[in-house]
Structures are given as C-alpha cells and as structure tokens.
C-alpha cells in the first residue's frame, strides 16, 4: 500500500469516526440526539414497528435480558444511527435484513452502514441487556419512564418525538407480579415461576410515551360509561383505599367526558389504565393506557384538605388532557414541549371550572399559576416559553414553571383575545388535522390566525418568544374631589422595552361601594376614559379579577383595609401583589408584611387563601428574617398561629395552621407540645392527624430536637407500609444530630446509585439545608453546584431544578450568596440553561442581600 493510498484510507477512517453519511449531507456522530440527526432521520424513515421482549427477574440486581426487532421503511439509503445510551457490553448481537453484522457502536449510537440496508422495508434484530436507570427498578416493582429522551437508555430506538411507531410488547415477570402497558393484554403463559404477558400492538406513539410497569400491585377493574378502566396500586392503608379509589375512577371519567365534548374527538387510544407509584418523580406522566401517578397525589385520607382534593382532580384532568394534547398530536421537536403542557394545564383548568364552579376556578387558577410563574419570570435566569434546543439530551432543562404556569396564563389571554368560540374552533381544526402526527407552535398559530383579526405574530413575539414580565404604574389626577384622568403604564422589568397585550380589571374602592374598570393594554400607556368624573376613591385595587400578568402597584391604604375586601379572588390578588412588591423592594419590608399576614390567620376563612398567606408567611420567616430577628419574635409568632388555629372553625383551616405551627416553631415549649402530640397520637381539638401526618411530625421533631432521641426509630416501628418505611430509613441520616453522619449522607449523593429515588433525595436535602442546620451545611453548597451538570445528565427532567430548590430555598446569608456568585464567575462558559436554573432558584438569596442588609 503506497503512501497516497494509506493517507486516503486514513481520511476515510477519520470521516467514518466523525460522521455518518446521510445522502450528501454528513451528520455528526455525537452523544444524544442532535436536531440535525433527528431532521435527517425523519426525512428518511417512516412506518416504524418495534417488537420488544423484556425478561424481568425477581432479583433487582439481575440484568434484564431483552430482544428487539425494528421494522421500518427507508426512503433513501443512509448511514443509519440507532440511539442506545449504554456501554457496548449491553449489546449482544445485531442483525440487519437477516444478516448478523459486526457491532459498530460509537457515541451512544449503533451504526448500520448503507450496504446492509435497502430502499423500502428493512428489518433489524438486536439482542441486548436493558438499561436499568429509566426502568426505575425497585425491590418488587419497576416502571418505565422515558420522557424526554430516556427510551434510548433502556433499548435501542429512534428516540425523537416525530418518529412515531407501533410497539408490540411482551414481558416475562415473576408469577406474582402484575403488569400494565400502553396496549391491551392479549394473552399470558405460565412457565415455572415466571409468566409471559403478550400485549396487542400499541397505537402510534413517540418513544417517550411508550411505557410499562410490572410488580407486586393490586389490580382494580371498573367500567365507567362504557369505558373499561384498570388501576394498579401498592397502597396498604384500607382507609385510604376506601376513601380514594372510587373518586379516582370518577375523576378520570369526568375528565374524559369533558375533553371528548370540548374537542369533538372521542378518547383516541385503545385502553384506559393508570398506576399509582410510591414516590414517583412527577405528579403524573401521560403514557396512553398506562398513566403513572405519584401515589400520595391519588390516595388521600379523611385528613385531606379541600385544596388536596382539587389538586387531585386537576392532576387527573391534566394527564387525561394529554391524551389529546401531546399524545394524539405531539410536538415535532422538544423545543415545543411546552405546547403539550400548556394545553394539559389549560384544559385541566377548564375541567376544574366545570366541576368546581367559576369562582373556585378563578381563585385556583390565580394561585396555581401566577406565584409560580413570577418565581421564575422575575429572576435574572428567566427563560421564554419557547426555547431553542439543539440536542435532545438537553431537553430536560426545558421543563420548569414557565411552561407549566406562565404558558396557561398566556393561553387564557389568547382565548380572551380571540373569543372562546373562535379559539375552540381553531383548536378542534388543529387536533383533527394533525391527529396521530406531529405539529409545531407555528402550525397552531397559522390555524388560529384564521379565526381572529388580531395580529397573533406580534402577540406571540412578546408572550411566547421573550422572557420577563411587565411592571405597571399609574398616574391619577383630580379636579377637586373628582378624577380628571387615570392612566396605567407598563414597562419591562428587565430587557428591552415592549408591551404585553392583555386584559384585566382595576377596582376603585369607596367606603360603601366599589367601581370595577376593564383595562385592555395594547400600548405602553392606557388611558381609562371611564374613570373621568368619578369620585376620588379610598384606594385602588389593581388586577382585581386576577387575570393580569405583571408587577402591579399596591396602595398603602389597601394594606390597611386588606381583610375588609369581601371577594376571595380580590384578596388573593392583593396578597400576591403585596408579596411581589416586597420582593421588588417597592413597598412592605419583610417584617411588616409578616405582621400583616399574621393578622390574617384568624380572619381569612377561605381555605385556599389561608394556604396562600401561610406559604408566604413561612417563606418570609425563614428566608427574609435574620436568625436574630427570628429568635426575637418566634414566640409571639407561635402564639399567634396557635391562637388563630383555635379560632378557625373548619377542620381544614385548623389543619393548615397546625402544619404552619409545625413548620415555624422554635421554642422549647412548642417543641414539648408537638412531641406530646406525636407521642400520644392525640391531635388538637378539631384536627384529624393520620399516619402521614405523624410521620412528618416525627421528621420535624428530629430536626428541631438538639438532644439524642429515638423519635425516628419509634416512628419507623409504627409505620406499616413497606414503601413508606424505606423512605423513612433513607431520610434518617440526613436528620442525624451527628454532623459526621450528615456529612457522610451528603458525600453519598455524589454516587448516582444513592440518587435513584429523587423525591427522597430532595426531601432529605430540604432537611439537610434547613435554616437550623445551615451553619454546618453551607459547606455543601459549592460541591452541590459542582454536581449539577451530572445531575442534569443522569436525573429525570425536574431533578436539576428540585435539587437546587431543596438546597438553596431558605438561605439568606452573605456567605451562601458568595458561593453562588463565585461559582458563576469561575464558570464563564457554563451551560446557559443550567445557569438559568441556578439564577432562578437563588433569586430569593440574591434579593435577601438587598432587602435584609
């Protein structure tokens, strides 16, 4: 071989290492699923059929032997990349069109050269060991959770949302296990200690919606309005089962009825099934035929509050709405992941409105969405609703409160702009046109534009494509005691000047009556002509109907009359405005607002509003007071809360205040009172405490007791449910009085195996970094930030955010702030999306430096 030939071959080898040739366009072989790879594959591949068999042993650590076939049609010959995020030793054999080929595995991809393929239909068979992580293997159950790109961690596939496929699944599991998947069970075959279940072919699904679960479950079958439903759960508390099961089935039925009617499309999949999973990572996940829920969200008890019941209904409606929005019509690429979430939340809210009535709906919409959206949109890490995504491995960082909470607010404003009927007609056309396919936000906007004269492209730019919120101010002039002019102006809290077109109300309040005025903002300044000539008001309540989005002014006179406002929705809007103004430094010092909220504990009778103000109260208490300020006032705070609890009449309101007392107490007297309640299991008058309540109380007592005790060991002995026992065992080291044991626990989190139960991890971190423990835990902060990139790569979609929130939420010290600032300065090229998460979750810490110091 001469030198020229050698050189030419070397270049060919180098090229093969770096690129997979797709026609004339090279696609880089790189980890993850790049947008370039996804685009090239969607142009070349269609008609995909997966056939998968997993053999699941009873022993958690034994590998899952698996076989797979992939049938698909190729429009043109390509250098095929099949995604598989495992080590090469997980691959046993690859055959293409009947011929076993050498395993060529690079950068998380199985490579198949064009000469092994043919135009038209191809058949690939792969023998492999399934990856464990996204199968969430536990001692006696597992569940597949693949959103957004985790299917490729378990089995080889084309892991992108616009390559929808049918899945023909079979599972071999221990005979005492039950199974559920997207499709209906076809048959089963017992062989010794194992049973093999075969399922029908699934409906067309993207890989992230393919799922199954298997384990020691209880199965319940019901038929609701000619719809057969199946439910798997592991709950052992007979009272919870009796109290919850019927309601769970009814909530699914009601949601399906509403959505079929609203969309004019029947339930679009072959079966209805759902499973309750202990300590599930999310509230729920919308796999058709096998919706997964967090067990504690479904199984309520007699001590549950009204808000918990509404939240359960809303959660079930949210996941059911996904059957149409996200499952029937799926985003083309995960930059539009927010589309499925905004519609799921928006439609769930509509179900809530129908079931609970407009007043309850409006109040819940305000409280559910606005504080959470503001919590991100006011920060230096604010992101737009629609974001750029170059590689699917970054998709997890797209999730957050902007897509879950700002987007529904945006959608409601869009519905107001278009009118309900026009909006509904547009959405129906969109669903019909793209059924069982994929669509983009631009596809939707193009359809909606046919049903309105408004300029949706301009509207879309500020609401969807840019971050941030407006700050409102007003100017009022008087001629004697009459209003001569009233105008409202808006400007950007940060970034370039722009206008958020929206509609809301302001209310002029007088001693014996009030006057609401509708505000439609389409320019930076809006003159309220209707106000001219009206008498001078006592004060003005901004955003009285709770529909407006932004930072609104708070009149001083309003704060004096806060609890004289008769409408719960208006009080809630005022509470939110007051808190947001405190954070912005515009009015209300933290201790002043804390005092205001303390006054409301006995007089605020609306349960949802009471929950709102105690949440704000606790946040101010732990995050915006110094340790010295807390110690000066904690006894009076405790007494006020306990007294308010005794004055409240309803069980739910009493329970809310009892939990608040448990949260904030510091005195020895209060500690003894709570210990006696836990020890004797005798709740205060008018309150019902059950096992979960006593378990939570035991954790609080362990945190706040500075003497050696056996509280957690005794609580463990009381706990009967195996899943709840395991959770308590995991948490115990994080609550130890021994600093070295806490250090050891934190060090253990550096290993992925100790982070498998993410809900347990974040709960443990919240105790580890509680203000009481921050003197010894502040030293964990730098290493926690150092771990974030790995957390993002190895954890589920919400874990980076919840990891940071559990750690930083209650810090207010200069030392903690310095750690964050030093980290950001020393990582100038840090992943922007993760940097934004840091800025979002440390916003209160940064604001505390200005507000407190």
Image: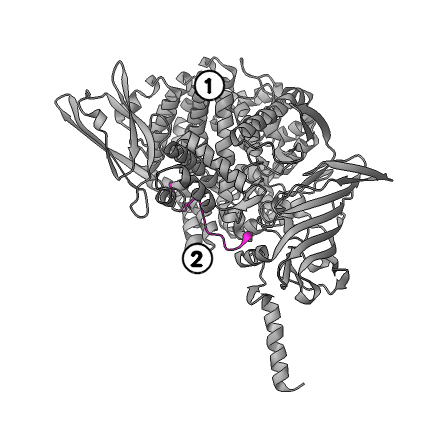
Q: Kindly report the distance in space between the C-alpha atoms of the residues bearing marks 1 and 2.
A: 47 Å
Tell me the tag on residue 218. none
**In front: label 1 or label 2:** 2
**What residue appears at the point 46 percent right and 30 percent down from the top-left corner?**
368
**What residue appears at the point 44 percent right and 38 percent down from the top-left corner?**
407
Is residue 779 visible in this depiction of the protein?
no
In what element is the residue under mark 2?
A: helix
Residue 55, how many percent across, how many down? 77, 46
**Depth check, front residue: 504 or 267:** 267
Is 77 left, or right, of 365 in this rendering? right
Residue 381, how many percent across, how many down? 41, 46
In what element is the residue under mark 1?
A: helix
Q: Which residues are magenta?
A: 378-392
- Residue under label 2: 826
Specify few, some or many for label 2: CA neighbours under 10 Å numbering under 14, 14-19, or 20 or more. Answer: few
- Residue under label 1: 642
Specify few, some or many for label 1: CA neighbours under 10 Å numbering under 14, 14-19, or 20 or more. Answer: some
> Does the magenta segment cover residue 8?
no
Residue 341, how many percent across, how many down? 51, 39
């Amino acid at each position: 071989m001469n030198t020229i030939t050698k050189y030419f071959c070397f270049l060919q080898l180098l090229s093969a290492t770096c690129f997979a040739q797709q026609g004339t366009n090279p696609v880089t072989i790189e980890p993850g699923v790049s947008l370039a790879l996804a685009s090239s594959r969607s142009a070349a591949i269609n008609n995909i059929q997966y056939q998968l068999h997993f053999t699941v042993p009873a022993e958690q650590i034994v590998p899952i032997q698996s076989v797979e076939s992939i049938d698909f049609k190729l429009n043109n010959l390509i250098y095929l990349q099949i995604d598989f995020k495992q080590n090469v030793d997980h691959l046993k054999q690859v055959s293409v069109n009947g011929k076993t080929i050498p395993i060529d595995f690079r950068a998380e991809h199985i490579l198949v050269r064009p000469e092994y393929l043919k135009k038209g239909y191809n058949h690939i068979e792969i023998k492999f060991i399934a990856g464990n992580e996204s199968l969430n293997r536990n001692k006696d159950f597992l569940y597949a959770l693949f959103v957004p790109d985790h299917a490729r961690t378990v089995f080889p596939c084309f892991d992108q949302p616009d390559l929808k496929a049918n899945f023909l699944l079979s599972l071999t599991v221990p005979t005492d296990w039950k199974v559920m998947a997207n499709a209906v069970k076809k048959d089963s075959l017992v062989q010794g200690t194992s049973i093999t279940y075969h399922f029908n072919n699934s409906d067309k699904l993207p890989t992230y919606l393919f799922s199954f679960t298997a384990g020691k479950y209880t199965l319940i079958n019901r038929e609701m309005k000619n719809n057969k439903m199946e439910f798997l759960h592991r709950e052992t508390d007979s009272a919870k089962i009796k109290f919850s099961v019927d309601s769970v089935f009814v909530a699914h039925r009601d949601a399906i009825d509403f959505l079929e009617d609203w969309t004019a499309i029947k339930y679009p999949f072959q079966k209805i099934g759902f499973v309750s999973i202990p300590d599930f990572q999310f509230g729920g996940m919308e796999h058709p035929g096998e919706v997964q829920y967090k067990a504690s969200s479904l199984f309520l008890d007699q001590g549950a509050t009204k808000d918990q019941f509404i939240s359960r209904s809303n959660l079930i409606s949210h996941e059911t709405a996904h059957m149409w929005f996200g499952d029937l019509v799926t985003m083309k690429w995960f930059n539009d992941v927010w589309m499925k979430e905004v519609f799921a939340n928006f439609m769930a809210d509509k179900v809530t409105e129908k079931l609970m009535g407009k007043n309850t709906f409006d109040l819940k919409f305000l409280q559910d969405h606005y504080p959470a959206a503001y919590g991100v949109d006011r920060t230096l890490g604010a992101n737009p609703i629609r974001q750029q995504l170059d590689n699917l491995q970054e998709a997890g960082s797209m999730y957050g409160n902007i897509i879950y909470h700002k987007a529904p607010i945006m959608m409601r404003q869009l519905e107001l702009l278009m009118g309900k009927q026009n909006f509904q007609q547009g959405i129906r056309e969109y669903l019909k046109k793209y059924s069982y396919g994929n669509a983009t936000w631009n596809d939707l906007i193009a359809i909606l534009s046919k049903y309105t004269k408004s300029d949706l492209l301009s509207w879309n730019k500020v609401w969807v494509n840019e971050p941030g919120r407006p700050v409102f101010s007003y100017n009022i002039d008087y001629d004697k005691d009459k209003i001569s002019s009233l105008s409202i102006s808006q400007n950007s809290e940060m970034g370039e000047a722009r206008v958020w077109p929206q509609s809301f109300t302001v209310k002029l309040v007088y001693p014996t009556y009030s006057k609401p005025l509708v505000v439609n903002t389409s320019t930076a300044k809006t003159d309220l002509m209707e106000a001219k000539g009206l008498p001078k008001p006592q004060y003005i309540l901004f955003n009285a109907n709770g529909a407006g989005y932004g930072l609104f002014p708070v009149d001083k006179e309003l704060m004096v009359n806060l609890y004289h406002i008769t409408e719960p929705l208006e009080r809630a809007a005022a509470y939110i405005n007051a808190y947001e103004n405190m954070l912005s430094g515009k009015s209300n010092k933290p201790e002043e607002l804390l005092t205001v909220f303390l006054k409301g504990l006995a007089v605020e009778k609306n349960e949802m509003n009471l929950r709102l103000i105690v949440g704000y109260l606790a946040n101010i208490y732990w995050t915006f007071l110094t340790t010295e300020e807390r110690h000066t006032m904690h006894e009076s705070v405790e007494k006020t809360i306990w007294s308010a609890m005794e004055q409240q009449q309803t069980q739910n309101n009493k329970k809310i205040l009892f939990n608040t007392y448990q949260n904030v107490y510091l005195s020895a007297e209060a500690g003894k009172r709570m210990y006696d309640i836990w020890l004797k299991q005798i709740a205060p008058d008018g309150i019902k405490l059950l096992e979960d309540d006593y378990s939570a109380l035991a954790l609080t007592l362990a945190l706040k007791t500075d003497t050696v005790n056996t509280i957690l060991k005794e609580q463990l002995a009381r706990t009967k449910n195996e899943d709840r026992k395991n959770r308590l065992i995991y948490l115990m080291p994080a609550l130890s009085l021994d600093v070295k044991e806490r250090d050891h626990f934190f060090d253990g989190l550096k290993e992925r195996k100790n982070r498998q139960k993410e809900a347990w991890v974040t709960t443990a971190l919240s105790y580890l970094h509680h203000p009481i423990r921050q003197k010894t835990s502040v030293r964990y902060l730098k290493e926690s930030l150092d771990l974030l990139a790995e957390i993002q790569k190895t954890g589920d979609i919400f874990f980076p955010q919840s990891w940071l929130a559990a750690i930083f939420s209650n810090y207010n010290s200069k030392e903690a702030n310095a750690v964050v600032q030093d980290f950001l300065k020393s990582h100038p090229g840090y992943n922007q999306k993760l940097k934004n998460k840091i800025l979002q979750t440390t916003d209160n810490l940064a604001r505390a430096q200005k507000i407190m110091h």
